[in-house]
Image: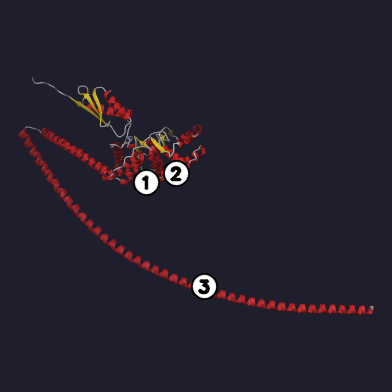
Amino acid sequence: MITEIIIGGGAAAISAVTAFIITRKVDASKYEIYVEQAKAKAKAIEHEAEKTLQNANFRVKEAELEAKKRYEEEIARIDSEYKQRLQQLEKREAQLAEKLEDELKEIARERKEIKQEKADIKAVQAQLEKLKSEYEAKRREAVKLLERASGLTDEEAREMVLKHAEEEARAEIAHIVRKYETEAKTEAQRKANYILAQATTRYAGDFAAERLINTVHLPDDELKGRIIGKEGRNIKTLEMLLGVDIIIDDTPGAIILSSFNLYRRAIATRTIELLIEDGRIQPARIEEIYEKVTEEFDQKILEEGEQIVVDLGLSPMHPELMKLIGRLRYRASYGQNALGHSLEVAHLAGIMAAEMGGDETLAKRAGILHDIGKALTHEYAGSHVDLGADVCRRYKEHPVVINAIYAHHGHEEPNSVESAAVCAADTLSAARPGARREVLESFLKRVKTIEEIATSKPGVHHAYAINAGREVRVIVNATLVNDDEAVLLSKEIAEEIEKSVQYPGEIKVNVIRETRAINYAR
């Protein structure tokens, strides 16, 4: 049994060794196969790489040949252009040389002619000198004969002739001066009337009077109580935010907003209208609607200013100036809308400047900006003239525009046709009938003040304000006031009126002095 086991184990061991040896041989043979396959693949890759390298070398050679060909062609083209340009330059040089030679010949000819003319002039001068000496000798001889005949010396005769000639010339000069002065005044008046007539007939502006109140219509009188609010909270909030007086009375279906500031009044009107439409009237909602309306008005003002500038053909212009132009719609002077007035002045000034040979566009620009300071007077201290000039300087406006701003109220003299046209257009727009509305009391007070200023002067008998207060006629005592003093008196009265009285346009001071001699035949 043991023997069998030993024999079986030996057989198994032999079988295992035999299997191991066979496996090693099989693996070795497979390894050799793999090695051969790898070598074959390596040769194939090497062959492919050599082939790729050959192709690359071939393409490089082709690229070199192509580049060489293009290079040679470019060299040939440049050489051809060079030869062509050189031929042109040589031809141009030959033409210039020929032209220069012709000019040199012409200069030589002219020089020869000048020499000949100089010789001729010298000959003529010599002849003139000879004739002059002969004339002087004969003149002296004639003077001696006249002295012997008249008994006057040469100096006395000359003085007498010159005095007589001076008297005759002086009278003739005075006559000519009076004649041309009269013609100049007549022509200037005719031309001025023609220009004004052309301007006023070609532009007819609408008149829009501004009031101091706005009326908001209510669909129901019960809304008055809601606008007032509990213990007046809503109306206090409205008046504080809007800056206007809200008048709620027994007027059915309406409340009244009162303010001298048109801009604030317009915002207040729109805010209350939106609150009525919304129905929620309370302090928080009031502030929200107010802010929304303010933003809308700011945008609307800018858009309106831009549209006006485009319509007048004045682009480009700084956006802040365009915004101020839009704000002029909410400013008024003596009931006349400031934007309407400025547009009227712009159109009139443009027409006048064109008639006088000036710059029509520049005159329009100065006209639309001449009262731009009025858009700032509610926010800043100072006159609208100074404010307008400062803002135009800040945004680099033309010097003519700034001069027109100062000149239209007499702060400066107009230094151009355009500035003068703006001054005339401003007066024409403000002074035409119906352009401005004044309260009766202020008008009567102004007329009374004008008359009192005139009658307070020594030598004045009576003073009458006529032509709606635009002219004052002053009657003086002829024995106390002479002609020169009458001129000074009119100037003094005009200066005091300028300092003491506020008025649109201008006031004419007419001092009348007369002497009456009365007698009776019995």
Q: Quadrant of the C terminus?
A: top left
Q: Amino acid at mark 3?
A: Ala
Q: How many marks?
A: 3
Residue ID at (32%, 37%): 408
Q: Secondary structure at mark 1?
A: helix
Mark toward the start of the polypeptide (1 vs 3):
3
* Residue 494 relative to residue 56: left or right: left
Q: Quadrant of the N terminus?
A: bottom right
In this rendering, the label closer to the viewer, 1 or 2: 2
Q: CA distance from mark 1 to mark 3?
A: 66 Å
- In the rendered view, how is the structure colored? secondary structure
Residue 196 x/y as whole percent: 25, 41
Q: Which residue has dot 3 on it? A: 63
Q: Which mark is residue 309?
A: 1
Between 35 and 236, which is closer to the camera in this rendering?
236
Crowd tier of the residue under label 2, counting other residues whose Cα lies within 10 Å: few below 14, some 14–19, many 20 or above: few
Crowd tier of the residue under label 1, counting other residues whose Cα lies within 10 Å: few below 14, some 14–19, many 20 or above: many
